[in-house]
Amino acid sequence: MATYIIFGSHLTRLIYSILGIYPFLKDTLKSIGPMVLVFLILPFVMDPTLSDRYFVVRMLLLAIGLIGSFYFIKNIKYPKGLNLLDILILLFISWQWLSTFWAINFSEALTNNIRFTLGGSVYFFWRYHSGSSRFKLEQLTGIMHIVGLVYAIVAWIGIIHIGIEYGLSNKDLYRLQFPAGHKSLIAEFALLILPFLFIDSQFKKLKWLSTPLLLGSIILLQSRAAFLGLLAMLFVGLFLLIKERRNQIKGYHILVVLMVLIGTIFTFKNQPIGERLNIGNYLNSQTARERILTWDKTLDLIKDNPLMGVGSGNWKIHFPSTGLDKQWVLENRDIIFTRVHNDYLEIATETGISGLIVWMLILIVGLYYASSLQDRNLKQLIYFFLAGYLFISFFDFPKERIEINLLFWTVLGFCSVHTTRPILKISIPWFVFL
C-alpha cells in the first residue's frame, strides 16, 4: 500500500513540476502543511491489491496528511469556543460511535465511524487553520485549479480509451474505473471541483481549459445525479445573479453558461445520451425503479428502528431482511445492494430519525453561517458546492467516498471561518485530533 502512495506522490509531483507550479506548492506547503499533498495526490491514489482499490488507501493518506498538518498549527489564535456547527458535528460523530453498540456488524460500523471522524477532523483543521495569518484562500483554490485540470485530463484519457475500444454508450462507460472506480463518482467529483474554480488564484487561467473539460466529462459520463447537481448549481447561480444584478457578471460566468447550453444541445440531440439524461424519462428508467423500490424497503427499516437505527454502517446487513420480491436484479443476477443511493435515508436507517435531524441541522446551520460571511467569493463557493452536493446525496452516496468527503468537510469548515459567537467556551487542542 505504501508503495502505491509513494508512486502516486512521485508521479503527481512530476506532472505538477512540468506545469511549472512547484514554487507555488512549496510556499503553500509551508502555509497549510501536508494537506496540500493530500489534495493533490488523494484523487489519484489506488491500491489494486484490495477489493476496494480506492477507499482504504485514500483514507490512510488523509489520516497521515491530517496528522502532519495539525502539527503545522502553531502560534495561531484558537477559536474562543465551540459554535453551534462545531457542537452539532461532534454530536453527530459521537452518535455514530455510540450506535456501534447495537450494530450487528462491528467492522462495517468501525469503517463508517472512522470515515466520519476523519471528515470531522478535516472540518476542525480548517476551523483552526483558517484563523492563521499565514492562510490565504487563494492558496487552496490555486491547488484546486491544478487538481481540476489534472482530473479532467485523466478522466478524458479514460473516456477516449473506452470510446475507441468499446464505444461511448452508458453500458460501455461502466468500464471506466479510474480515477474513482465508477463513472458516476468520477462525474460527481468533477462537478464538485467546479465551485472552487469560481475563486481567483495564481492559476485562474487554467479554468478556461479545465471548465470545458470537466463539464464535457459530466455530460459524456451520463450520470443523472451529477447532471441534476449541475442544474442545481445553475439555479443557484441564476438566483445570485438576479439578486446581485447584472453588473456582477464576469467572463467566467458567461463561459460556464455557454458551455452548459452547448452541452445541453449536444446532449439532447444525441439520442442515447439525451434519453438517459432527460429528467422526464428518469422515472421510467430501470435504475429509477430500483432506487424507488429500495427506498420503499428502506423506509420499512426506518419504521422498525425509528429512534436509534440499526447501527452505523449496517444498512447493508439489514436490507436483505426486507425480502427480494420485485427486486429482479437481486433475484436473477445473484447480487446485493450495498448502498441506499440516498444518503439521507441511509443516515436515518443507521442512526435513527435523531441522527438524520442532527445531520440536516449541520447542513442548515452551515448554510446559515455561510450567509453571514463577508467574503462574497467564499460565500458563492459554499452555496454552489452545497447545492450540488445536496442533490447528489439524494440520488447517490457521496458521503462514502474519501475524495468527495475531503471537499465537503473543507467547505463546511469555511462556513465557520468568521463566526464569533461561541456557545461553549471550550477550545479543543489540536493534538486531540491526532
Image (cartoon, rainbow, N blue to C red):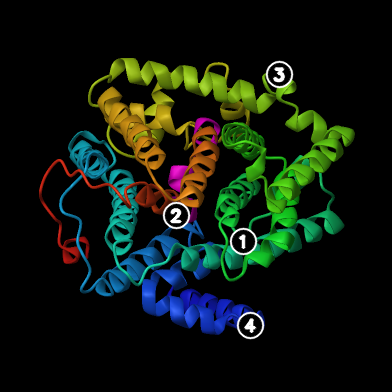
SS assignment for the magenta stretch, majority: helix
Residue 225: x and y in percent read: 61, 36
Which residue occupies 20% across, 56% down? Answer: 79
Number of numbered markers: 4
Q: Is residue 100 left or right of residue 172?
A: left
Lower sequence index among marks 3 and 1: 1
Check whether the beta carbons of the residues at disc 4 and disc 2 lie within 8 A of each other: no
Query: What's the residue type where badge 3 is placed?
Result: Asn
Q: Which residues are magenta?
A: 392-405
Lower sequence index among marks 3 and 4: 4
Mark sitting on residue 402: 2
Lower sequence index among marks 4 and 1: 4
Lower sequence index among marks 3 and 2: 3
Query: What's the residue type where badge 4 is placed?
Result: Gly
Disc 4 versus disc 2: distance between alpha carbons?
A: 28 Å
Which residue occupies 46% across, 53% down? Answer: 407
Which residue has dot 1 on it? 148
Of badges 1 and 2, the one in the foreground is 1
Quarter of the image that includes the C terminus: bottom left
Which residue has dot 4 on it? 20
Lower sequence index among marks 4 and 2: 4
Which residue has dot 3 on it? 284
Residue 402 drawn in magenta: yes
Query: What's the residue type where badge 1 is placed?
Result: Gly
